[in-house]
Structure formats: structure tokens, C-alpha cells
Image (cartoon, rainbow, N blue to C red):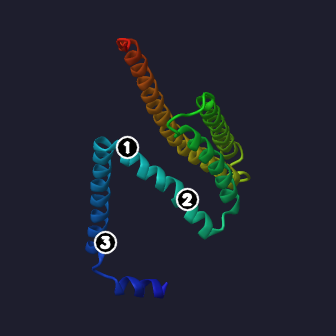
């Protein structure tokens, strides 16, 4: 108790400085949020790529640093399959079964992440003291992988849409050009 009173006496007069620090923090958060919203509105493609990159690699850093091996193993498995699906989806000329592969993979991920989130929520709500750690882990996994793979699905769909529209437009243009060719006169 005496040490606590001594600490208060030593730090007397710092209340104004602490209030300024809180105001600076709030102002910084508001300005940063406004800048992010403007960036997203003006340059959505670069915003999506940068946020997806950070959403992909920042958890990896903390996973390795904090030795969360279960998350790391799940992350590696899902990332390997998603890398393969993304590779197939981003080719200019993709195989005819690629859209079905992309759709099935991301639908499966959606269903798994939804179920994981639901069971995590139920575990926290039914027995909060007994299943709290397990439930919160499931909530996190469901939310992280759901949002993460939603962004990847949008990116793959955009690439496939652009690739399909470009290749079909060029094919349509080529057939139109063939139909307009005028036969040349026979050489004598």
C-alpha cells in the first residue's frame, strides 16, 4: 500500500500528458481509417492485394514466433491447396474444369469455416468455463479462414472472368475476321 502511494506521488501531474496521449491515439486511428477507406475507394486492386498479402503472412510470423504449431500445420495445408487452385485459376488459358475446381474448393472452405465458427460459438455459449479455450480457438479459425479464403475466391474469380472474357473476345474477333475475308483472285 505504501509503495502504491509512493508511485502515485512520484507520477503526480502526468494526468494531462496521459489524456494527450489518448487523444493522439484516437486521432491517429481516425485518420488512418479515413486514409484506408480512401485508398480502398480509389485503388481497390492494390488495396486488395496488399491487405491479402498481409492477411496471409502476418499470422505466419506470429505463429512461428509464438510456436502455435497446430495453426501452422493447418495454415500450410490450406495454403498449399489454395496455391494450386489459385495457380490454375490465374492462367490465361485455363482448363475447362478449372472453374468447377475453384468453385468446389472455395465452397468446401466456406462450409468448413462456417461449421467451425458455429461449433466454436456453441462451445462458448453452452459451457463457457469448460470449453472457453477450445471455443475461442474454433471461433478464430472459422473467422480467419472464412474471411481469408473469401478474398482468395474473389481474386480467383476476377482472374478467371478476365481471362475468359479476353479469350472469348479474341476468339469471337478471330471468327469475325475469318468471315469477312474476301477470297483472293486466282493467279494465272
Q: Position of residue 157 (x, y in %)?
A: 50, 33
Query: Which class describes the residues within 10 Å of circle 3: few (<14), some (14-19), or many (20+)?
Result: few
Task: Determine crowd level at label 1: few under 14, some 14-19, many 20+ residues with C-alpha closer than 10 A.
Answer: few
Q: Which label belongs to residue 159?
A: none
Q: Which residue is mark 2?
A: 59
Cβ atoms at labels 2 and 1 below 8 Å apart: no
Per the model, the C-alpha gap separating discs 2 and 1 is 22 Å
Q: Is residue 169 above or below residue 62?
A: above
Sequence-first disc among 2 and 1: 1
Q: Residue at x 70, y 52 (%)?
A: 134
Q: Give how far across and how far down residue 86 sits, in percent.
A: 56, 42
Q: Nearer the viewer, residue 75 or 12?
A: 75
Residue for badge 3:
18
User: Looking at the figure, which quarter contains the C terminus?
Assistant: top left
Q: Position of residue 105 (x, y in %)?
A: 64, 36
Q: Which mark is residue 45?
A: 1
Amino acid at each position: 500500500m505504501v509503495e502504491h502511494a509512493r508511485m502515485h506521488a512520484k507520477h503526480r501531474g502526468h494526468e494531462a500528458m496521459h489524456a494527450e496521449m489518448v487523444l493522439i491515439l484516437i486521432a491517429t486511428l481516425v485518420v488512418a481509417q479515413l486514409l484506408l477507406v480512401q485508398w480502398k475507394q480509389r485503388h481497390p486492386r492494390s488495396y486488395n492485394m496488399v491487405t491479402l498479402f498481409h492477411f496471409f503472412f502476418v499470422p505466419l510470423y506470429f505463429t512461428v514466433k509464438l510456436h502455435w504449431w497446430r495453426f501452422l500445420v493447418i495454415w500450410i495445408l490450406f495454403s498449399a491447396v489454395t496455391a494450386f487452385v489459385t495457380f490454375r485459376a490465374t492462367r490465361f488459358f485455363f482448363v475447362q474444369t478449372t472453374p468447377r475446381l475453384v468453385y468446389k474448393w472455395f465452397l468446401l472452405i466456406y462450409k468448413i469455416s462456417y461449421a467451425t465458427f458455429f461449433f466454436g460459438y456453441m462451445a462458448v455459449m453452452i459451457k463457457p468455463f469448460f470449453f472457453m479455450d477450445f471455443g475461442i480457438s474454433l471461433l478464430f479459425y472459422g473467422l480467419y479462414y472464412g474471411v481469408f479464403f473469401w478474398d482468395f475466391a474473389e481474386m480467383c474469380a476476377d482472374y478467371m472472368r478476365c481471362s475468359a472474357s479476353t479469350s472469348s473476345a479474341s476468339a469471337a474477333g478471330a471468327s469475325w475476321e475469318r468471315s469477312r475475308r474476301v477470297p483472293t483472285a486466282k493467279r494465272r
